[in-house]
Image (spheres, grey):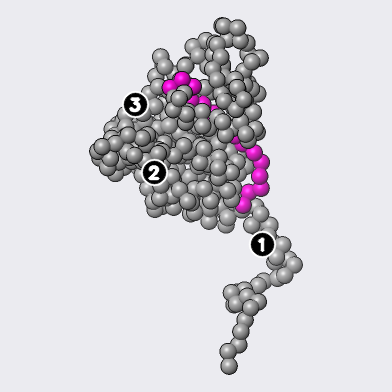
Amino acid sequence: MAIPNTVVNLTAKDFQTDQEVRWCPGCGDYSILAQVQKIMPSLGIPKENIVMISGIGCSSRFPYYMNTYGMHSIHGRATPIASGLKATRPELSIWIVTGDGDSLSIGGNHTIHLLRRNFDVNILMFNNQIYGLTKGQYSPTSEEKKVTKSTPYGSIDHPFNPLALVMGADATFIARSMDRDPKHLQDMLLRSYGHKGSSFLEIYQNCNIFNDGAFEAFTDKTSKPVQTLFLEQDKPLLFGVNKELGIRLDGFKPTIIDLTKGFSVDDCWIHDEKDFYKAQILVRMFDDPAIEGHLPRPFGVFFQKDRPCYETQMNEQIDYVLKTKGKGNLDKLISGNEVWTIQ
């Protein structure tokens, strides 16, 4: 991933605050914070033009630790607050920091509407598959039969697949990374920033207190090569210790092929971030219980497309109306065209 031209002489340290970072020792949030601070100077944006907006949760402490403007808002409402700010100050770089509970439970409705409107903001959704701040209840992404304080006999809820959900909301940029792969996370943060429109980056984040090891298969050095699939534009879907395994489509079903047993790279699925239909297969590759644990988990950019941003269209509409109609009359607008006089 190419680093944008730096026009402001800043360092990662310039984005650190004097606040004590109060996450549990070993929490994946520390790594995410470090990677965000590392990529910020390369964006070439003055700190006063960057805004971090969060809701409620462990992840939502983020604005305190970023030396930018920011707001720690209320549960699930970071998205409408960010929408209002972007609509009125479109020149700002706005980052929404949220968790799986904050954005997909009480804030789920706000999330899907921001995505369909396509405000030019960046959503970082930390997914630890648990409620960490409130001490370990199951969340909208917790797996079925998950035993927690609020589900002592196991959860009977079917979990959300976050990327499938935002795909259904017509998000224009969809990606996934993880806290324990700093280089990949930095690349995905830069890709998210570079997209014109709403970017949704799901970040697998380990909660070592209440859900330790939830993503260990994708981060452990011994299992990572066969359990993860890193997506690259125009590249074949390859994985394995020596990239000896590949993915091909059997109709609409992804299957694993072994390049040492009669198959070649030419038989593999070639990734195209613009392919809406194949992106829907990718986001659901691990949903089928018949193949759970066999197909690798994809990471990278699943899908992106160009679509006009809401704030741009809104301000163009306002300018047009002012030029052609002049300032309006609020009382007349509220009354509408159907008015009755009662005698």
> Magenta span has 294?
yes
The residue where tag 2 is placed is 101
Q: Is residue 79 above or below residue 62?
A: below
- Tell me the CA gap for discs 3 and 1: 51 Å
The earlier-in-sequence mark between 3 and 1 is 3
Q: Is residue 125 left or right of residue 147?
A: right
- SS of the residue under disc 1: helix
Residue furthest bottom in the image: 343
Observer-nearest residue: 277 or 123?
277
Q: Quadrant of residue 325?
A: bottom right
The residue where tag 1 is placed is 318
| Magenta-drawn segment | 293-310
Q: Residue at x 36, y 44 (%)?
A: 57
Crowding at mark 1 (Cα within 10 Å: few <14, some 14-19, many 20+): few
Q: Quadrant of residue 148?
A: top left
Q: Is residue 13 visible?
A: no
Q: Amino acid at mark 2?
A: Gly
Q: Do the residues bearing badges 2 and 1 touch, measured as CB atoms within 8 Å?
A: no
Q: Amino acid at mark 1?
A: Ile
Q: Residue at x 53, y 51 (%)?
A: 113
Q: Quadrant of residue 17?
A: top left
